[in-house]
Amino acid sequence: MPLIPLFHVHGWGTPYVVMLSGTRKYVLPGRYDWGHILKLIHEEGVTYTGGVPTILYILLTHPDSQKYDLKGLRFGNGGSAMPEGLYNAAKARGMIIASGYGMTETAPVLTMAYLRPEHLDLSEDEKKQLVLRTGLPIPLVLLRVVDEQDRDVPRDGKTMGELAVWAPWVAKEYLNDPEKTRNAWRNGWFHTGDVAVWLPDGYVVIVDRLKDVIKSGGEWISSVKLESIISTYPAVGEVAVVGVPHPKWGERPVAIVVPKPGQRITEDEIKNHLMKFVEKGEIPKWWLPDKIVIVEAELPKTSTGKIDKKVLRDRFKDELTSAT
């Protein structure tokens, strides 16, 4: 039985899926107060809910969270990539995480990150890495990852390109905005503005938004990858990585980190944590942020609950620029 706010993806898609699949009951929470939501999950026997990662983080860290058993609760993640540290925290509470991807313009779902039969005997850590991917296209969706000339990039899991899609339900145009429509629809494919890599097995992994990817010395740095790694440090609550102007390299990454309630973090702790992943060969050393900014306040969010990087760049402009 799902709990569904009538907002964005949930309002457009999930109620229809719930009814068509014969689900016995679903819960409309009314006000989206987090203590109220946790109480509803417990009292109504909710087995499924969803949202962006911020919603999951709040459910896990709310003062009332420890009062309730979340074991077996399925959480459908979308809107932005699931940080690995947040995934680990949810699994520690016995939750089951599923990830999908879509856009407002695609009404909305394009991919789901699910396990194939050949994956069932993998280790839990290997399964986790699959579930954290953006996923495989759902029926009737076609995907490509293309370079600036609209050529397919290699399916090597390394070469970045823009995700382009086609499906019967993708919006054909932007109202009264022909220029934006032309920029999105090129060569018969809708260009999402998301940067991704394509793997040999057909899965795609979104590594950033084109507007958020950090261009340093002519190469791309994935803010999403850095955020996921930083999130695995036990004391980290929230993290955002943004690019700031640099006179030599064009842009350089800066990380803004919020500790978990009652925890303390230093810049050196985060840098040392990141170096472990450099030594393992998961990221190159030149990806390391030039500065780690530790803040106590919650990071600003958009109306859909995503971390608002534009606001962060404006808010910390002087401090971030001084990092370069």
Image (cartoon, grey):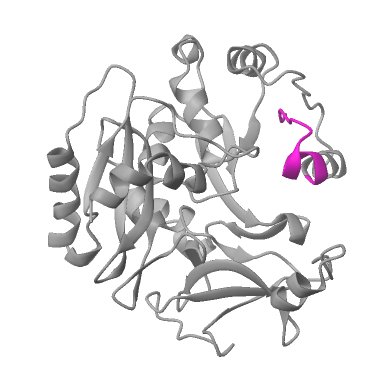
Instruction: Give the left or right position of residue 268, taking residue 243 as reference.
Output: left
Q: Is residue 28 above or below residue 43?
A: below
Count up the numbered dots: 0
Considering depth in this image, is 229 or 124 the residue closer to the camera? 229
Quadrant where the C terminus sits is: bottom left
The spot of residue 62 in percent (x, y) is 48, 17
Up-down relation of residue 243 to residue 79 (above or below):
below
Percent across and percent down for residue 33 are: 64, 17
Q: Position of residue 197 (x, y in %)?
A: 46, 72
- Is residue 5 on the magenta stretch? yes
Q: Residue at x 52, y 43 (%)?
A: 308
Residue 288 covered by magenta stretch: no
Q: Is residue 281 visible?
A: no
| Above or below, 124 relative to 73 | below
Q: Nearer the viewer, residue 92 or 83?
A: 83
Residue 76, quarter of picture? top right
Dominant secondary structure (helix, strand or loop) of the stretch shown in magenta: loop
Instruction: Say which quadrant the N terminus sits in.
Output: top right
Up/down of 52 relative to 148, above or below: above
Asked if residue 21 lies left or right of residue 322, the reply is right
Q: Nearer the viewer, residue 307 or 123?
A: 307
Q: Is residue 198 visible?
A: yes
Q: In the figure, residue 183 lies in which quadrant?
A: bottom right
What residue appears at the point 74 percent right and 30 percent down from the top-left corner? 5
Identified at 44% across, 13% down, the residue is: 66
Per the rendered image, the range of residues in magenta is 1-13
Left or right: residue 52 compared with residue 221: right
Specify whether 196 is left or right of 305.
left
**Residue displayed at 41% across by 45% down:** 83
